[in-house]
C-alpha cells in the first residue's frame, strides 16, 4: 500500500509513504502526482501521523454511570463510593462487554495504543482477569497496557500488597498506586516504596494516581520522583493527575521542578475530568484543579493528555474522541498561543507514546510498524481549529477505519 500526498509534521512539502506488509518500507518526497492504484490511499495534502494514544483510561469502569446510583455531588470521593457499590455487581462478561464497546469507540477516533487502569482492590481480581482476556481478544485493534490499580489503597486495603503482587503475576504490565488516598501520609509513602520495589523486581512500568486532590499539603509527587531518580527508573515512571500541583505555592514548586527534571518521569493530565472533579471545596475564587501542564511542558519535561473516564461514576460524559480532550485541555491549561497550537498534537501522540514507553514500536519512520492515521487537516493548528477527525486509520498495513466527513448543502 502507498499513501500519496501526505503532509508530515516537521517536514516541508508532500510525501509518499510506502507500506510493505506490517512495516513502513519507505518515506519519500513527492514532487508529482502519479496515478493512484487500487488499494492505495490519497491523503490529499492532509497530515499523516502515528496513531493517537490514550494514556489514561479506566476500561473496567466505563459505561457504568448511574449504576446503581449517580454521583450527585460530582466529587472524586463520591465517585469512589459509587464505584465501590458498582463493583459488587461486576461480572466477567459485564466487564468484557463494556470494555470492548469502549475500545470500539476509541478505535473509531484513531486510537491504537491504550493504557487502562484496572481496579485490583477486589479479592477475586475479577475485573483484571476479564481485562487480560480483552487484551488478547482486541490485539488486532489496539495495543493495550494494563495497570494494576489499587483504587482503595495498597496499605489501607486488606491484603492490598498481596493483591498487587498477584495482579503482576497474572500479567499486568504496569504497577499503579494512589498514595493520597491511603489513610495516613506514612502509609502513602510506604505504598510508593512498595510499588516501586514491585516494579523494579518484575520489570513492569509504573503509573501512579498521584496527588489527585486540591490539598496543597498532598506532596507524594516528590516521593515518587525521588524514588524514580535514586533507582534510575525515570523513563519507566509516570505520575498521573498531580492536580495538587495547581495548589502548591510557587516557592515550593520551584524546588519541586528541580527534582522532577532530574527524575526524568512523565506526566499525564486528564483535563476534562480534573476540571470537573476538582475545586469542589471552593466557593469563589474557584480553582481549576489541574496540574501545571504548560509549565511542565516549558520546563522540557514530558506531559500528555488522557480521557480518564467515559460515562462512569467519576465523569458522566465522553465518547472516545481524544481530540475533544486536546481542544478542551488547551483551553483549560492556557495553551492557545500559536506556538502551542502548532505542536499541539504532541500531547496525544509522541508525548503519550513516550509516557507509555512505546519506543521503536511507535512513529512514522522506515522499519517501524505500519500504523498511522490520515487526518482531516494539513497541520496541528487547523486540526484543532476545525475540530478535525481521523479520516483513515491503518494498522499492521491494513485499513482499520474510514470516516466519511459530513457533507453540507447550502441553499
Image (cartoon, rainbow, N blue to C red):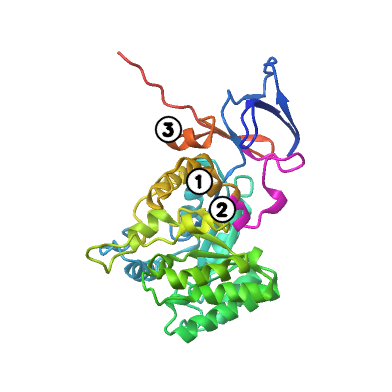
Q: Which mark is residue 293?
A: none
Q: How many residues crowd mark 2 within 10 Å: few (<14), some (14–19), many (20+)?
A: many
Instruction: Please identify the quarter of the rendering in which residue 9 is found.
Output: top right
Residue identifier under label 2: 114
Q: Earlier in the sequence, mark 2 or mark 3?
A: 2
Q: Earlier in the sequence, mark 1 or mark 2?
A: 1
The kind of secondary structure element at disc 3 is loop
Instruction: Please identify the quarter of the rendering in which residue 291 is found.
Output: bottom left
Residue identifier under label 1: 106
Q: Which mark is residue 386?
A: 3
Segment colored magenta: 351-372
Q: Is residue 339 magenta?
A: no
When the figure is inspected, residue 207 is found, relative to residue 13, above or below; the finding is below
**In the displayed structure image, the side of residue 27 where residue 154 appears, left or right:** left
Q: Which residue: 70% across, 69% down?
A: 203
Kindly check if marks 1 and 2 are in contact, taking CB atoms under 8 A apart as contact.
Answer: yes
Q: Which residue: 64% across, 30% down?
A: 12
Q: Quadrant of the N terminus?
A: top right
Q: Who is closer to the viewer here, 360 or 158?
A: 360
The kind of secondary structure element at disc 2 is strand
The kind of secondary structure element at disc 1 is helix
Relative image position of residue 346 (x, y in whole percent): 56, 46
Amino acid at each position: 500500500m502507498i499513501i500519496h500526498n501526505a503532509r508530515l509534521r516537521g517536514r516541508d512539502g508532500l510525501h509518499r509513504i510506502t507500506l510493505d506488509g506490517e512495516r513502513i518500507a519507505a518515506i519519500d518526497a513527492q514532487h508529482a502526482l502519479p496515478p493512484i492504484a487500487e488499494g492505495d490511499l490519497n491523503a490529499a495534502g492532509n497530515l499523516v501521523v502515528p496513531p493517537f494514544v490514550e494514556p489514561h483510561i479506566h476500561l473496567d469502569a466505563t459505561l457504568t454511570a448511574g449504576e446503581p446510583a449517580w454521583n450527585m455531588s460530582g466529587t472524586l470521593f463520591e465517585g469512589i463510593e459509587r464505584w465501590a457499590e458498582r463493583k459488587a455487581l461486576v461480572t466477567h462478561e459485564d466487564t468484557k462487554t463494556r470494555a470492548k464497546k469502549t475500545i470500539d469507540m476509541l478505535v473509531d477516533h484513531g486510537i491504537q495504543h491504550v493504557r487502562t487502569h484496572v481496579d485490583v482492590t477486589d479479592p477475586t481480581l475479577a475485573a483484571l482477569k476479564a481485562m487480560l482476556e480483552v487484551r488478547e481478544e482486541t490485539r488486532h485493534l489496539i495495543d493495550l497496557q494494563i495497570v494494576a490499580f489499587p483504587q482503595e489503597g495498597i496499605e489501607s486495603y486488606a491484603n492490598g500488597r498481596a493483591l498487587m503482587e498477584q495482579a503482576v503475576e497474572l500479567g499486568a504490565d504496569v504497577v499503579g498506586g494512589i498514595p493520597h488516598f491511603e489513610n495516613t501520609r506514612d502509609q502513602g509513602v510506604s505504598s510508593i516504596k512498595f510499588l516501586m520495589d514491585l516494579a523494579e523486581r518484575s520489570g513492569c512500568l509504573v503509573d501512579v494516581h498521584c496527588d489527585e486532590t486540591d490539598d496543597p499539603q498532598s506532596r507524594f509527587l516528590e516521593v515518587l520522583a525521588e524514588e524514580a531518580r535514586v533507582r534510575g527508573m525515570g523513563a519507566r515512571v509516570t505520575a498521573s493527575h498531580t492536580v495538587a500541583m495547581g495548589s502548591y505555592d510557587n516557592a515550593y514548586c520551584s524546588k519541586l521542578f528541580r527534582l522532577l527534571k532530574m527524575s526524568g518521569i512523565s506526566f499525564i493530565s486528564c483535563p476534562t475530568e480534573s476540571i470537573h472533579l476538582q475545586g469542589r471545596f471552593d466557593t469563589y475564587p474557584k480553582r481549576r484543579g489541574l496540574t501545571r501542564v504548560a509549565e511542565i511542558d516549558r520546563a522540557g519535561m514530558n506531559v500528555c493528555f488522557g480521557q480518564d473516564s467515559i460515562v462512569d461514576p467519576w465523569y458522566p460524559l465522553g465518547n472516545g474522541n481524544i481530540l475533544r480532550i486536546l481542544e478542551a485541555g488547551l483551553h483549560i491549561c492556557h495553551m492557545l498561543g500559536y506556538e502551542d497550537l502548532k505542536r499541539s498534537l504532541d500531547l496525544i501522540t509522541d508525548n503519550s507514546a513516550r509516557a507509555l514507553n512505546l519506543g521503536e514500536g511507535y512513529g512514522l519512520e522506515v522499519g517501524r510498524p505500519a500504523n498511522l492515521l490520515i487526518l482531516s487537516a494539513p497541520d496541528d493548528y487547523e486540526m484543532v481549529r476545525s475540530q478535525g477527525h481521523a479520516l483513515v486509520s491503518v494498522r499492521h498495513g491494513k485499513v482499520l477505519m474510514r470516516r466519511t466527513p459530513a457533507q453540507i448543502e447550502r441553499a
